[in-house]
Image: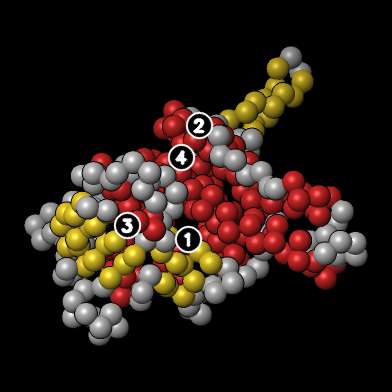
Amino acid sequence: MSSGFFAARLGGSRIAIATPPSKGMLLARLEGLIREGQKQLRAFAEGRTQFIAYVRDLKERAQHCLADIGEPAQKELRELATMDLSISEDLAGWYAKGVYNDFEVKEGDPSDFLRAQAEYDQATPPKIQSIIALLGQVRAKMLGIAPAVEAESLIRPFPTPEGTTWADVLIRFTGDFEVQISVADRSEVRTYIEMGFEDRRGKRNPKPDRNWVVFRDLAERNGEIRSTKEAAEWPKVEKAVQAVNARLKQLLGIPDAPITYDRRSKCYKAKLKLIGPPDNPETGI
């Protein structure tokens, strides 16, 4: 661990005594790890594979940092420790042979490598997003501000039938501030507040947060949000999609992510059916 040290003399000899990192140092390390995670997500968004070693290094450094923080990070540390970053045996076999791109394939079918790599590229960004979320929760605790997950505690769960998948879910925006959720023969209207999307910074004038705006934009664009060239803007979209995923998973009780990144088309795609507000010209409704 990267704890500090200072030298002291005892009986004529010098000894090194570990000093715990300060709160400022720990916060700086958290911020650095969050930026590193966002950098890796941008690489995936731009179609550049981040090899497993980079992701494992991020996880290891995050574990070291949370261990140094101590009790305030124990829950997040346990969750991080159980995160599975393993890759398929096929991809591990290619990497063991020193093959990291299809043009390096000397023996075998390059399409086999590309298929294994595509599976890794699809599965890994949500795991990096989870690391960022855990680090963000600890940062919020240390700063004494309400973590984003508190909004999820306000969510009133939808009575989702057992065995439902995201493909079975329809969410239609009936206005700017509410939606109609339909699954099989069940249908309910929910406001952004009941779904955990309230901007809680201002109590006098309730309004939706930025994540709700991105969610609505996703519906207006037929369930897709494409990568933008503005480097400063895309990380905000990634963070918002992560929050939307968390809200919808708790609302519907479906464990996998409802919105995933498609590397080939370079856009986020919703697995559920989304329909934008009635006055949206793109929906034709």
Residue where numbered disc 3 is placed: 169
Sequence-wise first label, 1 or 3: 3
Give the alpha-carbon distance from disc 4 to disc 2, as whole Å: 21 Å
| Cα distance in 3D space between marks 3 and 4 | 44 Å
Instruction: Say whether disc 2 or disc 1 marks the residue closer to the N-terminus.
Output: 2
Q: Quadrant of the N terminus?
A: top right
Residue on which disc 4 sits: 23
Secondary structure of residue under mark 2 = helix
Residue 221 horizontal/vertical position (percent)? 35, 76
| Amino acid type of the residue tagged 2 in the rendering | Arg
Q: Position of residue 183 (x, y in %)?
A: 27, 54
Q: Which label is found at residue 260?
A: 1
Instruction: State the residue in front, 119 or 141.
Output: 119
Q: Which mark is residue 78?
A: 2
Which of the two labelled residues, at mark 1 and mark 4, occupies the earlier sequence position? 4
Please name the amino acid that badge 1 sits on.
Thr
